[in-house]
């Protein structure tokens, strides 16, 4: 006898408790957070160990007098009061502000200009980009030594070249009227390739369609830059303004030590060099920490102001 076997619906496969737990959105989110924390841990440990803790220790040290032999004496706000009456600190602060207001715009304009130039396609553009960025991969001490050799009075390369055409060069690093300006020019030359690279990344992130639309509308180079390039570079511009300010205020110590050692006549003694001098030449670690604390407060205030004025570099279509 032939029988017909009915096809009953197969029972749905049972889902184990482990599989349900694995597919739970909350569990997945916890795993992702745990992975994120693991990836962030090395940087967080490094920042805490080498930045946050030393910064807090420096602030605490600013309220002590250190005798150089391990002796600490609490002096309250005496180190901060000393700053107000210290003419060398006040002059170095004023000099640093001049240095800042020249270098930050100089680095911004030179970096943007070079980025706009090397964005274009022309023969050997890759070699040109590499040459502009190359100083950033060389030690700053080596760069300073090379420039010191080039600018040596009478026997330096620059002095010999100018002498051949009948020009008597000034003492670039030995004359107080020229020393700080010379350091500024060298710093811009050294750093502009780095900011060029950042601006170039920002320019390449702008969709080509925007430029095509501007071209169809008949916009010229200046109108295209003003209405397309500049608004879309706001996040990059914000980043460069912030990082270049911090770099100018806190960096370049090696160059100052090698080129001028703060001279002549303290004409290149910036705040960062004055902190180094007080701490490691005169052993005034408490006073140096107080000056460094004020620098940190100034940078924090400037960063907060920049965030407020530019909304952190964010922009909307209404802009």
Image (tube, grey):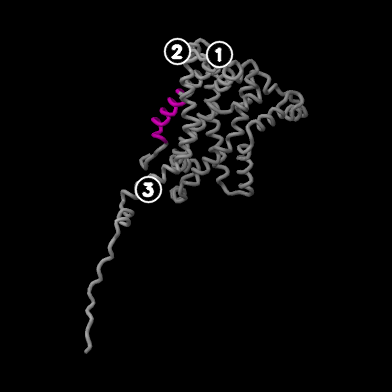
The one of 58 and 147 positioned closer to us in this rendering: 58
Q: Earlier in the sequence, mark 2 or mark 1?
A: 1
Distance, label 2 to label 3, CA atoms, is 48 Å
Q: Residue at x 41, y 44 (%)?
A: 36
Q: Residues within 10 Å of mark 1 (few under 14, many from 20)?
A: few
Whole-percent x and y of residue 69?
57, 16
Q: Nearer the viewer, mark 2 or mark 3?
A: 3
Q: Is residue 260 visible?
A: yes
Q: Earlier in the sequence, mark 2 or mark 3?
A: 3
Whole-percent x and y of residue 7?
23, 77
Q: Look at the image and say whether residue 84 sits in the magenta stretch.
A: no
The one of 108 and 63 positioned closer to us in this rendering: 63
The one of 77 and 214 positioned closer to us in this rendering: 77
Q: Residue furthest top?
A: 85
Q: Is residue 269 visible?
A: no
Do labels 1 and 3 touch, CB within 8 Å? no
Residue 107 placement, left or right of 167: left
Residue that label 3 marks? 31
Q: Residue at x 48, y 26 (%)?
A: 55
Q: Which disc, if any, is residue 76?
A: 2
Residue that label 1 marks? 67
Secondary structure beneath disc 2?
loop
**Picture quadrant of residue 96:** top right
In the image, the segment drawn in magenta is: 297-312
Q: Residue at x 54, y 11 (%)?
A: 87
The N terminus - image quarter: bottom left
Q: Earlier in the sequence, mark 1 or mark 3?
A: 3
Q: Residues within 10 Å of mark 3 (few under 14, many from 20)?
A: few
Distance, label 2 to label 1, CA atoms, is 16 Å
């Amino acid at each position: 006898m032939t029988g017909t076997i009915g096809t009953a619906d197969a029972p749905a496969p049972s889902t184990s408790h482990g599989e349900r737990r694995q597919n739970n959105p909350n569990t997945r989110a916890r795993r992702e957070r745990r992975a994120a924390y693991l990836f962030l841990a090395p940087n967080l440990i490094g920042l805490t160990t080498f930045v946050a803790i030393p910064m807090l220790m420096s602030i605490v040290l600013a309220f002590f007098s250190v005798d150089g032999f391990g002796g600490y004496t609490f002096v309250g706000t005496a180190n901060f009061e000393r700053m107000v009456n210290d003419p060398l600190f006040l002059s170095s602060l004023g000099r640093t502000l001049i240095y800042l207001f020249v270098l930050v715009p100089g680095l911004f304009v030179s970096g943007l200009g070079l980025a706009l130039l090397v964005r274009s396609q022309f023969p050997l553009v890759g070699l040109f980009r590499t040459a502009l960025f190359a100083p950033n991969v060389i030690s700053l001490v080596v760069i300073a030594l090379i420039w010191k050799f080039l600018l040596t009075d009478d026997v330096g390369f620059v002095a010999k070249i100018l002498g051949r055409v009948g020009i008597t060069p000034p003492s670039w690093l030995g004359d107080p009227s020229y020393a700080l300006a010379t350091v500024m020019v060298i710093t811009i030359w050294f750093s502009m390739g780095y900011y060029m690279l950042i601006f170039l990344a920002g320019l390449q992130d702008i969709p080509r369609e925007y430029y095509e639309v501007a071209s169809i509308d008949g916009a010229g180079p200046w109108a295209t830059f003003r209405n397309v390039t500049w608004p879309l570079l706001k996040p990059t511009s914000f980043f460069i303004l912030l990082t270049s300010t911090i770099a100018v205020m806190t960096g370049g110590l090696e160059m100052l030590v090698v080129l001028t050692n703060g001279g002549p006549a303290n004409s290149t003694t910036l705040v960062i060099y004055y902190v180094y001098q007080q701490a490691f030449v005169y052993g005034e670690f408490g006073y140096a920490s107080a000056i460094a604390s004020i620098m940190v407060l100034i940078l924090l205030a400037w960063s907060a102001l920049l965030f407020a004025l530019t909304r952190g570099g964010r922009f909307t279509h209404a802009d």
